[in-house]
Amino acid sequence: MSSLGYRRLLVTARQYILARSYASQNFQTYEPVNEPLLDYAPGSSERKEVEEALKRYNQQVADIPIVIGDEEIRSGPELFQVSPHDHNHKVAKYRYATKDIIKKGIDSCLKARKQWERTPIEKRADIFLKAADMMAKERRMDLVATTMIGQSKNVWQAEIDAAAELIDFLRFNVAFARQMTQYQPLSPDSNITNRSVYRGLEGFWAAITPFNFTAIGGHLPAAPALMGNVSLWKPSDTAMLSNYEVFKIYREAGLPAGVINFVPADGPVFGDTIVSSPDLAGVNFTGSVKTFKYLWKQIANNIDTYKSYPRIIGECGGKNLHFVHPSADVESVVNGTIRGAFEFNGQKCSATSRMYVPESLWPDIRDGFINIHKEIKMGSPLEKDSFVTAVIDDKSFNRVEEYVNHAKNNPNNKIIAGGNCNNSKGYFIEPTIIETKDPKDRLMQEEIFGPVLTVYVYPDNKCIETAELANQTSPFALTAAIFAKDEGAQKELVELFRDNAGNFYINDKSTGSVVGQQPFGGTRLSGTNEKSGGPHYLMKFVSVQSVKENKAPLREWRYPSMQL
């Protein structure tokens, strides 16, 4: 094992001890730290362990049930999740819940709600900290391996996502919950006691989760549950294997039956069923703008149905930019943009998709891109030197290929690297870098969600004018980055892009937010900006009750002013 990996494991062991001592005693003092990343270097124990896990999962087709309470349901036609890098390889079989099964899941959640909501938050936190400890230790490689096989993440991206980020969500949420619930109102009168009661919402939450982050899959149902809510979890068809592993860990950590029900389902059937229930408390969603708008409209149409107004949380992706000032460090721009645009094949919500570069720097940046592009390996995530793998499925492949073909057929666009697409074995899209003469081309405006970067080169003397153009080009506002060494330019660009991004980076790439460090979320069509990974997110999942207790009996009904 490398010395770095050994140090990280030592820190992980210390965290494990702290978390376990917290779980029984120290809710009021628990302070998490970010989970260290294992490096999977040659000869390390983690590389051996993940290879063993990959072999185990690669040799089987997991049979994933619908789980309602303690009941496992395996009725209906069989569907299959395949490896994106080898679409003939089945990794899991599953079935869709019917409308009646979804309703059964809602009933199960509601049945579990009262006891769970009244369980002290210390005990609820204990369960999720135990789950985090299991993810950090004995179940870590299960999460990493299933994410690699099922979602085609290379080992580094899987480690960042399925292990570290999910562990961080669970641990930091405990600290955020403590901080939030510590507030109690003033009681200046000695005869009166005022207090706030932090209740879970009446009804159930629907968690609709994406394929691209196992951590988001596990977090969206767990965050409401920590605060005393119950969740109906609809996992993505293309992340079924890893998401089911997360669900099993929650149950093994002690989560009671029915608090989170695992309900694979057809999207429209699930959506129509949950929005028609009078007990819908909220929707926690990550996915497309189209689906989120549909759910919002359906909730609005059914508003007279509900016992309470449902809360709606949405994160819908972005058209994230890198804006390069003439004073920028070229090497940092090149390396940061390659990572920002092409890590996990451009399938991060925050992936760099458009770029603005001054004429004076473009030759060096272009050459840097081309030189690195020659070194990038595209292949199976099971091959350790693969930087780029496959996009998630045939729909994604066809959509991204259509954008690449648009670039090839439009005289305003020039492909300077990449542009090849091949789905004969896996859904492989070569990292593609396009130079455009049209800053309003659809490549600069529309979310692609694949390994495609479009660059607009601007005259150096039109920097601010171009930044203003970039600010108004796309309807999204998730992430953005500026690269500038000139401090005056930094300040001007920060102000100009103030409303352009929920997560903003200076001299760093547009991706890579860390729980507790850069809470995540965007505005405009990118979502409701609730900032998961930060202290404010959990307020969505509580309904605060204000209680006043008067210990002094009232002896008079008249006001003093009424005396004659």
Image (cartoon, rainbow, N blue to C red):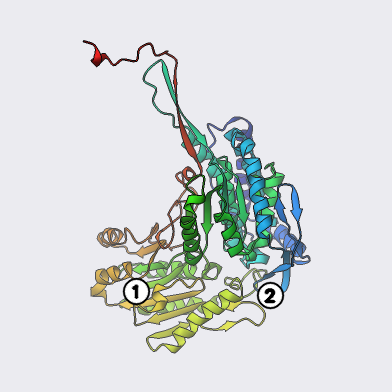
User: Can residue 299 be seen by looking at this rendering?
Assistant: yes
**Dot label at residue 104:** none
Q: Residue at horizontal 45%, vertical 66%?
A: 336
Q: Residue at horizontal 43%, vertical 63%?
A: 510
| Among the two numbered marks 1 and 2 on one chain, the one whose residue lies closer to the N terminus | 2
Compared to residue 549, the image places residue 346 above or below, namely: below
- Residue neighbourhood size for the residue with mark 1, other residues' Cα within 10 Å, grouped as few (<14), some (14–19), many (≥20): many
Camera-side residue of 537 and 148:
537
Q: Secondary structure at mark 1?
A: strand
- Which residue occupies the extreme left position in the image? 564
Read off the residue under disc 2.
86
Amino acid under disc 2: Asp
Please identify the quarter of the rendering in which residue 87 is found: bottom right
Amino acid under disc 1: Val
Compared to residue 446, the image places residue 557 above or below, namely: above
Please identify the quarter of the rendering in which residue 454 is found: bottom left
The percent coordinates of residue 429 (x first, y second) are 56, 78
Please identify the quarter of the rendering in which residue 393 is found: bottom right
Read off the residue under disc 1.
357
Q: Residue at horizontal 68%, vertical 41%?
A: 256
